[in-house]
């Protein structure tokens, strides 16, 4: 069976984890955590990066840093994971969902401005499949309406928009290092902070609302509870696992891109015949091969294709159920405008296996099975 996903493993993860154990420093903000933070800052150009226990909690930190209050509104796509929404709902915000683009499956930037009200506080674009949203337009809208931009770049590590790393363009960016992502620490994430003035506030929130980070730097002689916060620090053993992959980020990225292009080239003839649709990568975007998906004609065809692939030892899956159609989505938010693409795309999108270590023979087996279904 070709699994849908296998957690990435670069080779030195165990060695680094043993080093973390031997150092007697396995709690948060140890040497491996600091090295990961430094790697992110260097490779994205962000002012400050802090590892977190998940992308979910990075988003929750972003909501706190955005000073979300009950009644504030947040504009976001419905085609995303629940964490994007939960982070703001936990602070009392009302969600305003808008439709997505049919090409990239990202939030339709042309629909954002008409969804803005006097209660809008944040725009939360989601970079689906590691393909950047139209960030120039989004940042222009945010600037003119004095709004905060929180990038959900969970899938966007090593991807960019017009040469700028995803997650580094808005006020805050959030990465995921879950086992299904391109680079993994099992469970984990990071928050990227553009404004240096927000960096210390982020450290306080992340350290349970204390100024412990300042204490460890010798800036205060004792630390105390100074603000609202929680424990968002991952173990340094998790960071050790991640660092081994970040050090091989280019190798991992190139291997995934090779698999992605292998899929595209093999399946492009089906697209040319109008049988399926393949991913679209805008010219200004450099993606990271986070996923490879195809678009079937309808949900029934997708179900039959999933079964056909399973019968041929290939695990393929569908993706998000639109948040606005869920029980909680209806309670905490509303859909602004017409749902022209979100539900339709959700019902037709099928993800093929994609992970570091996927061989060219595996790609050939998957694409042969897809072609056999249609031809």
Image (cartoon, rainbow, N blue to C red):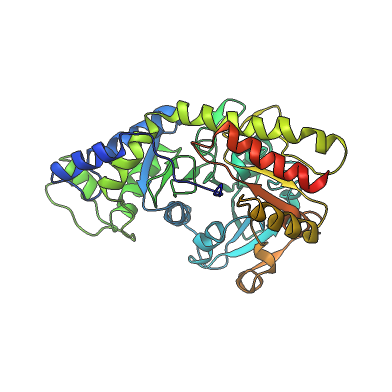
Q: Residue at x 44, y 33 (%)?
A: 46
Foreground residue among 80 and 266: 266
Residue 160 visible in the shown view = no
The single residue placed furthest to the front in the displayed view is 312
Q: Position of residue 342 (x, y in %)?
A: 74, 56
Quarter residue 16 falls in: top left
Foreground residue among 183 and 272: 272
Foreground residue among 287 and 357: 357
Q: Residue at x 78, y 50 (%)?
A: 296
In the image, residue 328 sits, relative to residue 155, either above or below, namely: below
Residue 353 visible in the shown view = yes
Foreground residue among 22 and 6: 6
Q: Report whether 95 appears left or right of 274.
A: left
Q: Report whether 290 appears left or right of 107.
A: left
Q: Residue at x 85, y 44 (%)?
A: 275
Q: Residue at x 87, y 41 (%)?
A: 274
In the image, residue 294 sits, relative to residue 160, either above or below, namely: below
Q: Report whether 270 appears left or right of 168.
A: right
In the image, residue 72 sits, relative to residue 371, either above or below, namely: below
Report the number of numbered marks.
Answer: 0
Quarter residue 131 falls in: top right
Q: Report whether 265 appears left or right of 260.
A: right
Q: Position of residue 260 (x, y in %)?
A: 62, 34
């Amino acid at each position: 069976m070709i699994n849908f996903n296998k957690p990435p493993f670069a080779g030195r993860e165990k060695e680094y984890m043993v080093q973390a154990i031997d150092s007697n420093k396995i709690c948060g903000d140890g040497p491996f955590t600091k090295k990961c933070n430094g790697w992110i800052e260097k490779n994205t150009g962000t002012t400050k990066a802090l590892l977190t226990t998940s992308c979910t909690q990075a988003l929750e930190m972003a909501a706190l840093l955005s000073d979300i209050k009950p009644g504030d509104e947040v504009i976001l796509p419905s085609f995303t994971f629940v964490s994007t929404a939960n982070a703001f709902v936990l602070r009392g915000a009302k969600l305003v969902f808008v439709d997505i683009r049919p090409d990239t499956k990202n939030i339709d930037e042309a629909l954002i401005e008409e969804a803005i009200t006097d209660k809008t506080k944040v725009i939360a674009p989601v970079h689906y499949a590691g393909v950047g949203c139209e960030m120039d337009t989004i940042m222009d809208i945010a600037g003119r309406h004095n709004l905060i931009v929180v990038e959900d770049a969970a899938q966007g590590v090593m991807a960019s928009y017009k040469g700028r790393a995803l997650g580094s363009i808005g006020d805050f960016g959030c990465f995921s290092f879950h086992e299904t992502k391109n680079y993994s620490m099992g469970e984990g994430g990071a928050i990227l902070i553009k404004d240096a003035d927000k960096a210390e506030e982020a450290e306080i929130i992340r350290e349970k609302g204390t100024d412990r980070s300042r204490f460890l730097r010798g800036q205060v002689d004792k630390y105390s509870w100074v603000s609202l916060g929680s424990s968002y620090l991952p173990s340094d053993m998790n960071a050790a696992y991640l660092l081994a992959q970040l050090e091989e980020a280019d190798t991992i990225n190139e291997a995934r891109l090779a698999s992605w292009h292998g899929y595209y080239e093999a399946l492009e003839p089906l697209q040319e015949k109008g049988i399926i649709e393949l991913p679209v990568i805008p010219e200004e975007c450099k993606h990271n091969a986070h996923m490879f998906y195809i678009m079937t004609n309808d949900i029934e065809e997708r179900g039959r294709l999933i079964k056909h692939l399973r019968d041929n030892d290939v695990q393929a899956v569908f993706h998000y159920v639109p948040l606005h159609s869920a029980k909680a989505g209806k309670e905490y938010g509303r859909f602004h405008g017409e749902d022209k693409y979100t539900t339709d795309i959700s019902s037709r999108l099928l993800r093929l296996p994609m992970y570091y270590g996927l061989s060219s023979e595996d790609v050939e087996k998957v694409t042969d099975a897809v072609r056999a279904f249609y031809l």
